[in-house]
Amino acid sequence: MAKTSKATERQDYSIRLVRADEIALLPDIEMKAGALFADAGLQDVADNPPADLEYIESFRRAGAVHVAVSDRGEPVGFALSGLLDGAGHLYELSVDPAHGRRGLGARLVAASGNSAHARGVRAMTLSTFRDLAWNGPFYARLGFRELARNEWTPGLHLLHAREIDIKLPVERRCFMRKEL
C-alpha cells in the first residue's frame, strides 16, 4: 500500500472564530498564500510583508477573524472582515496552498458574510485583482459583482488611495459587492 503525503491525505476542516493564541500563526499562512502572486507575475505583491499581529488582533477583538482549521487542530486559512461604510468588508482572505482547492476560501467568505448578516449588515464588499482566477472570478462565482467607480463609497475611495500608496497595480484591481 502506497503512503500518502500530508498534503494529499483526506482531511476534514471546520470554520470558526480565531482564538487569541492562534493569532501568531496567521502571518505564516498569509506568506504561503501570498507566494502564489509571484507565480502570477506579481512578485512585488508576493514580497509584501504579512499583516502585523496588532492589526490582526484588532479584528479578533471585534469578532471578525474566521479560521479554517484542519482535523489536526491547526489553522490553515483565515478571513479578516469588518464594517466599512455600513457594509461588511472582507479585508483579507488567505488559505495555505497546501490546503487549497478544497472550498475553504468559499467557506471562510460565507462565514464572514453570515457574521455580518447576523449583525444586521445587508451587503459585503471587498477589493481584489479582477483578472486572477483565485480573485475576481472566484468572488464572482460566490455572487459578488464588480462595482463601477460611481458606486464606490467614501471608504472604498480611501482603500483605493491606500492601494496606490503601497504601489499595487490598481489598473488590475476592482471593488466587488454582494447583497447578503
Image: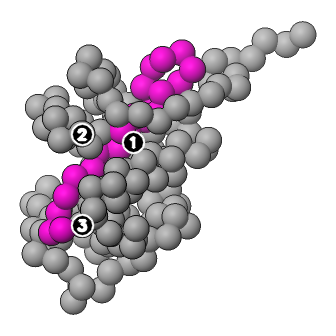
Task: Measure the C-alpha gap from mark 2 to mark 1.
Answer: 17 Å
Q: Earlier in the sequence, mark 2 or mark 1?
A: 2
Task: Measure the C-alpha gap from mark 2 to mark 3.
Answer: 16 Å
Q: Earlier in the sequence, mark 2 or mark 3?
A: 2
Q: Which residues are magenta?
A: 66-86
**Callout 1: 10 Å neighbours few (<14), some, many (20+)?**
many
Q: Residue furthest bottom?
A: 150
Quadrant of the image containing the N terminus: top right
Q: Which residue is mark 1?
A: 94
Percent coordinates x, y for residue 15 in the rendering:
47, 36
Label annotation for residue 87: 3
Label annotation for residue 117: none
- In the rendered image of this protein, does residue 5 appear above or below residue 145? above
What secondary structure is marked by label 2? loop
Q: Amino acid at mark 2?
A: Gly
The answer to if 77 sits in the magenta stretch is yes
Label annotation for residue 63: 2
For the point 46% across and 53% down, the residue is: 110
Task: Measure the C-alpha gap from mark 1 to mark 3.
Answer: 21 Å
**Callout 3: 10 Å neighbours few (<14), some, many (20+)?**
many
For the point 16% across and 77% down, the residue is: 153
Q: Amino acid at mark 1?
A: Ser
Percent coordinates x, y for residue 47 in the rendering:
27, 41
Residue 88 falls in image quadrant: bottom left
Q: Amino acid at mark 3?
A: Ala
